[in-house]
Image: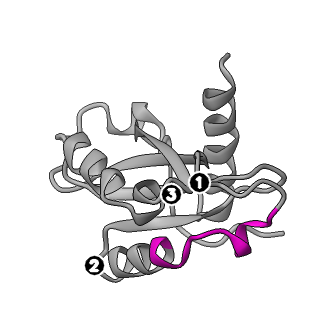
Amino acid sequence: MNIALKHLSVALILACGLAWVRPAYAQENATAPAQAGPALFAILYRPGPGWKAGLPMQKQALREHAQYYQTALRQGRVFAGGALAKIDGGLAILRMSSLDEAEAFLAADPALLNGTFVGEVHAWTPRFVADGPLKP
């Protein structure tokens, strides 16, 4: 498994753990109509050419990236996002109407434009759906 996909798999598992989880197996909804509206997409961020090695994420050029995400969060376009533990980079789960829209969102991200991050978008189909908080 290539390292980016391995990190994405770990990140998605972590994102599910931070969300609210209720089994929603495909069998339950086998006859349900396709859902209209936004789909979910995962963005995996890794250090780009502008990343300053040896500096923690809080000291990287990410202020405009954070503002970009805050705006998208208020618009309902972001489900969750944040840093990954023990590796440089992050994960975001987006609500977008299409892969093209998610890729355009990533391409306009100030952290990509300034080279701090590189990123990749993946369509995400969760098999578990939020219902309530996980218990510790």
Under mark 1, the amino acid is: Gly
Give how far across and how far down residue 122 sits, in percent: 42, 37
Check disc 2: other Cα within 10 Å, few if <14, some if 14-19, many if 20+.
few
Residue holding disc 3: 92
The disc at residue 22 is: none
Mark 2 to mark 3 CA distance (whole Å): 15 Å
Mark 1 to mark 2 CA distance (whole Å): 28 Å
Residue holding disc 1: 50
Residue holding disc 2: 75
Q: Residue furthest top?
A: 1
Confirm whether the magenta stretch covers residue 14. no
- Residue 49 lies left or right of residue 94; in this view the side is right
Kindly identify the residue that appears in the image at 66 percent across and 52 percent down. Answer: 89
Whether 26 is drawn above or below 130: the answer is: above
Secondary-structure class at tag 2: loop
> Is residue 9 in view?
yes
Secondary-structure class at tag 1: loop
Which stretch appears magenta?
55-65
Kindly identify the residue that appears in the image at 40 percent across and 57 percent down. Answer: 113
Confirm whether the magenta stretch covers residue 62. yes
Depth check: give the residue in front, 129 or 49: 49
User: How many numbered marks appear?
Assistant: 3
Under mark 3, the amino acid is: Ala
- Whichever of labels 1 and 2 marks the residue nearer the N terminus, that label is 1
Check disc 1: other Cα within 10 Å, few if <14, some if 14-19, many if 20+.
some
